[in-house]
Image: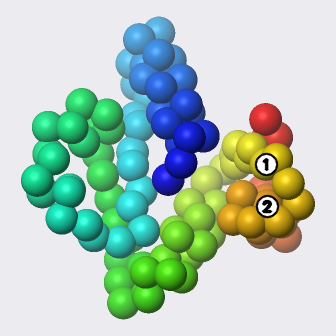
Amino acid sequence: MGDFDSLFSSAVRSAKKVYPHIKLIGVKPYFTNDINTDKDYYAALYDDIIIPDELAGIHPKAAIKARNRWMINNSDIVLIYTVRNYGGAYEANRYAERKNKAIIII
């Protein structure tokens, strides 16, 4: 939900030109109205947008952390970019380590 996500999405879209079977799926932590009002924008960026059922009812302040954990739990490889030893990306890295996921640190 920040600059890294935008850079990563752009890299995946470039890779799709060589590997068309790759899918770029946006995983939102909760529903926002822009999903409906900006459909063309999201359709241009992603192959699909999902909001995991497991996140329903989670308070928005906790939803991003829960979404990050959901993505880690549902991934074989986790790409991590951190610039400090605190915050959401750092916590996601620690969580991925505890889950014994393959981690690529960028």
CB contact under 8 Å: marks 1 and 2: yes
Q: Name the residue carrying label 2.
A: 90
Q: Tag 2's secondary structure?
A: helix
Q: Tag 1's secondary structure?
A: loop
Percent of width and height locating residue 69 = 62, 69
Residue 74 shows up from this direction: no
Mark 1 or 2, nearer chain start = 1
Most extreme residue toward the top is 18
Q: Amino acid at mark 1?
A: Thr
Q: What residue sits 59% from the left and 73% below the top?
A: 65
Mark 1: few/some/many CA within 10 Å (<14, 14-19, 20+)? some
Percent of width and height locating residue 88 = 69, 65
Q: What's the CA distance linking mark 1 and mark 2?
A: 6 Å
Q: What residue sits 60% from the left and 40% below the top?
A: 4
Picture disc at residue 82? 1
Q: Amino acid at mark 2?
A: Tyr
Q: In the displayed structure, does residue 86 sit left or right of residue 6?
A: right
